[in-house]
Image: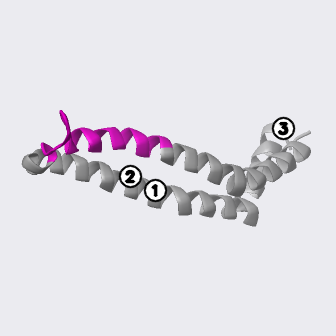
């Protein structure tokens, strides 16, 4: 068995392991709903900017209107999602990924 064949069999074994499947499940269980939620939030902003101009132009404080606040909240939500994902990954994904990485490193030495 060549090194390349050995490496491929190790990675195939890892890919089929229950730990790897759990890692993928946890990743998808968090990222898919968050992606959908963010896209809905973003599209709401776009749709309201196009079809609810009067509402979006409503002044809140001085020259600051609802459209500007919603636009700034897009940035805030992006940073909050990134922060939340890093916490999720650190607690739920990284331990499994580290375990799998160590197993692969041991098998490929």
Q: Nearer the viewer, residue 102 or 16?
A: 102
Local secondary structure at mark 3: helix
Residue 59 quadrant = top left
In the rendered view, would you say 89 is above or below 21?
Answer: above
Q: Quadrant of the N terminus?
A: top right
Residue under the point 77% across and 53% down:
95
**Numbered label attached to residue 3:** 3
Circles 2, 3 touching at the beta carbon (< 8 Å)? no
In the rendered view, would you say 25 is above or below 75?
Answer: below
What residue sits right under mark 1 in the picture? 34
Question: Which of the two discs, 1 and 3, sits closer to the camera?
Answer: 1
What residue sits right under mark 2 in the picture? 38
**Left or right side of 13 for 61:** left
Circles 2, 1 touching at the beta carbon (< 8 Å)? yes
Residue 74 quadrant = top left
Q: Write down the region rendered in magenta.
A: 56-79
Does the segment drawn in magenta span residue 78?
yes
Q: Earlier in the sequence, mark 2 or mark 3?
A: 3
Principal SS element in the magenta part? Answer: helix
Q: Residues within 10 Å of mark 1 (few under 14, many from 20)?
A: some
Residue under the point 54% across and 59% down:
30
Q: Return the x and y of residue 36 as percentages of the image width and height.
A: 39, 57
Does the segment drawn in magenta span residue 54?
no
Q: Return the x and y of residue 60 as percentages of the image width and height.
A: 20, 44
Q: Nearer the viewer, residue 46 or 31?
A: 46
**Left or right side of 108 for 50:** left
In the rendered view, would you say 29 is above or below 47?
Answer: below
**Left or right side of 82 for 93:** right
Residue under the point 89% across and 47% down:
107
């Amino acid at each position: 068995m060549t090194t390349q064949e050995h490496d491929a069999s190790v990675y195939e074994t890892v890919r089929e392991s229950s730990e790897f499947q759990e890692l993928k499940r946890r990743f998808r269980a968090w990222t898919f709903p968050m992606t959908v939620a963010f896209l809905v939030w973003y599209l709401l902003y776009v749709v309201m900017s196009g079809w609810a101009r009067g509402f979006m132009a409503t002044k809140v404080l001085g020259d600051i209107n609802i459209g500007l606040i919603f636009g700034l909240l897009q940035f805030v939500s992006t940073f909050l999602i990134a922060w939340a994902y890093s916490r999720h990954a650190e607690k739920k994904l990284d331990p499994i990924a580290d375990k799998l990485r160590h197993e692969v490193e041991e098998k490929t030495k």
